Image (cartoon, rainbow, N blue to C red):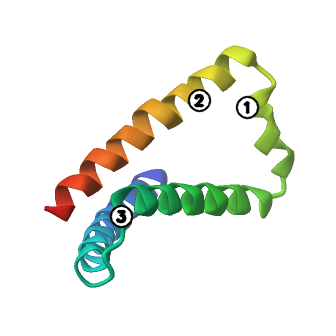
């Protein structure tokens, strides 16, 4: 399969998972009275664990730690994770709770 088809498949899967995630979040808010902060924290931690696990299953698993070798890249990654991903997820999920 060429890169274009794989990219298209990833876009379709991403859209499907986004829709499922929104529906599940709405259900958790309505039926189980889950807090937004808890849901965002659990989602991001589980996503991180899943990505680390997938990388660990690859033959070049030592690359997991390469990102921390450069101080500037590590700071950018932490800033993106905290400012970018956390705020994005908090605002997206908080609007679904209404």
* Residue 77 circle label: 2
Q: Nearer the viewer, residue 23 or 42?
A: 42
Q: Is 95 situated left or right of 83 in this image?
A: left
What residue sits 35% from the left and 49% below the top?
A: 89
Q: Position of residue 44 (x, y in %)?
A: 51, 55
Looking at marks 3 and 1 on the same chain, the residue that comes earlier in the sequence is marked by 3
The residue drawn where x is 77% and y is 44% is 64
83 over 13 or under it: above or below: above
Q: Where is residue 14 in the image (x, y as percent from the top left)?
A: 36, 62
For the C terminus, the quadrant is bottom left
Q: Do the residues labelled 2 and 1 touch (CB within 8 Å)?
A: yes
- N-terminal of the two: label 2 or label 1? 1
Q: Mark 1 points at which residue?
A: 67
In the rendered structure, find residue 94 and report the number of the disc placed on it: none
Q: Confirm or deny contact between disc 3 and disc 2 (CB under 8 A).
A: no
Instruction: Say which of marks 3 and 1 sits in front.
Output: 3
Q: Give the Cα distance between marks 2 and 1.
A: 8 Å
Helix, strand or loop under label 2: helix
> Quarter of the image holding residue 26?
bottom left
Dot 3: what SS? loop
Vertical comparison of 33 with 87: above or below: below
Looking at the rendered image, the disc whose residue lies closer to the viewer, 2 or 1, is 2
In front of the other: 17 or 92 = 92
* N-terminal label among 3 and 2: 3
Q: Quadrant of residue 56?
A: bottom right
- Looking at the image, is 25 positioned above or below residue 10? below
> How many labels sit on residues?
3
Q: In x, y percent, where is residue 76?
A: 57, 22
């Amino acid at each position: 399969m060429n890169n274009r088809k794989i990219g298209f498949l990833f876009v379709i899967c991403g859209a499907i998972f986004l829709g499922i995630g929104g529906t599940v979040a709405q259900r958790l808010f309505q039926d189980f009275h889950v807090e937004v902060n808890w849901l965002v924290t659990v989602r991001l931690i589980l996503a991180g664990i899943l990505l680390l696990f997938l990388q660990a299953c690859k033959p070049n698993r030592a690359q997991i730690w390469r990102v921390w070798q450069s101080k500037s890249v590590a700071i950018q990654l932490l800033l993106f994770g905290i400012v970018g991903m956390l705020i994005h997820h908090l605002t997206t999920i908080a609007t679904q709770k209404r």
